Image (cartoon, rainbow, N blue to C red):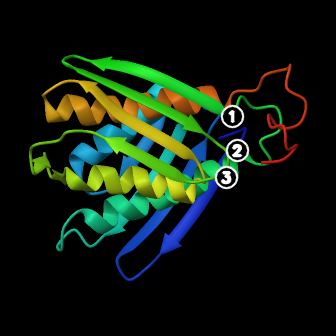
Amino acid sequence: MTGRIGKIERDTAETRIQMTLDLDGSGKADIRTGIGFFDHMLHGFARHGLFDLELRVDGDLQVDTHHTVEDTGIVLGNAIREAVGDKKGIARYGSMILPMDDALVLCSLDLCKRPYLSWDLRLDRERVGELETETVREFFYAVSYAGEMNLHIKQLDGFNNHHIVEGAFKAFAKALDQAVRFDDRIAGVLSTKGTL
């Protein structure tokens, strides 16, 4: 991997995680979390954001999926923050309204160092595959706070839980890809304060 890279290792009594994220990749992913649908979502995140992502998670799946999903969100947020660096010259903001069959999902974000999650996905199944749907919010909450970003994810349409969740991951990928892009017109960081 080359470019802006975040490499994070996190060990707790509940999970052991190793992640390498390259913001300047081509969408390659090598992911093993032990949760098939979660792997599928993270592959989509890497592919559609054009990020290279290597991830290994050894979590307490004998309990449930919560710790694995939430802790992966913490690590991804930390990796984004590390990879993006001082934020000089980047767009800072990103937004995407993404169609996924019946689902239409909006994601808008600001890499502003002021963490906040605004969430409105209407998931009405307990699980998609082996993934507990309530953990999807926990994942994005963890990403937003560890990554120090303002993150809004809204369901505009849809009824199929698989499509809604997948739309959220892909919309997040596209919005993040916009936010981390360099813009030659930006001197320093994009802020009237002069710092982020």
Work out whether residue 125 or residue 166 is closer to the camera in this orientation and state it. Answer: 125
> Residue beneath label 1, please?
92
Q: Which mark is residue 84?
A: 2
Task: Tell me, for residue 113, which label it has, or none.
Answer: 3
Nearer to the camera, 129 or 92? 92
| Amino acid, disc 3 | Lys
Q: Residue at x 45, y 65 (%)?
A: 17
**Residue 27 visible to an observer of this rendering:** no
**Residue at x 71% of width, y 39% of height:** 2
Q: Are marks 2 and 3 in contact (CB under 8 Å)?
A: no
Where does residue 131 sit, x and y in percent of width and height? 19, 52
Res 171 → quadrant: top left
Instruction: Give residue 13's position: percent from left, percent from top.
Output: 38, 83
CA distance separating discs 1 and 2: 10 Å
| Callout 2 secondary element | helix
- In the image, 108 versus 34, the foreground residue is 108
Q: Which residue is farthest bottom?
A: 13
SS at circle 1 = loop
Q: Earlier in the sequence, mark 2 or mark 3?
A: 2
Q: Nearer the viewer, residue 11 or 161?
A: 161
The residue located at (55%, 59%) in the rendering is 146
Visible residue check, residue 142: yes
Farthest residue in the left direction? 125
Q: Disc 1 marks which amino acid? A: Arg
Q: Is residue 135 left or right of residue 20?
A: left
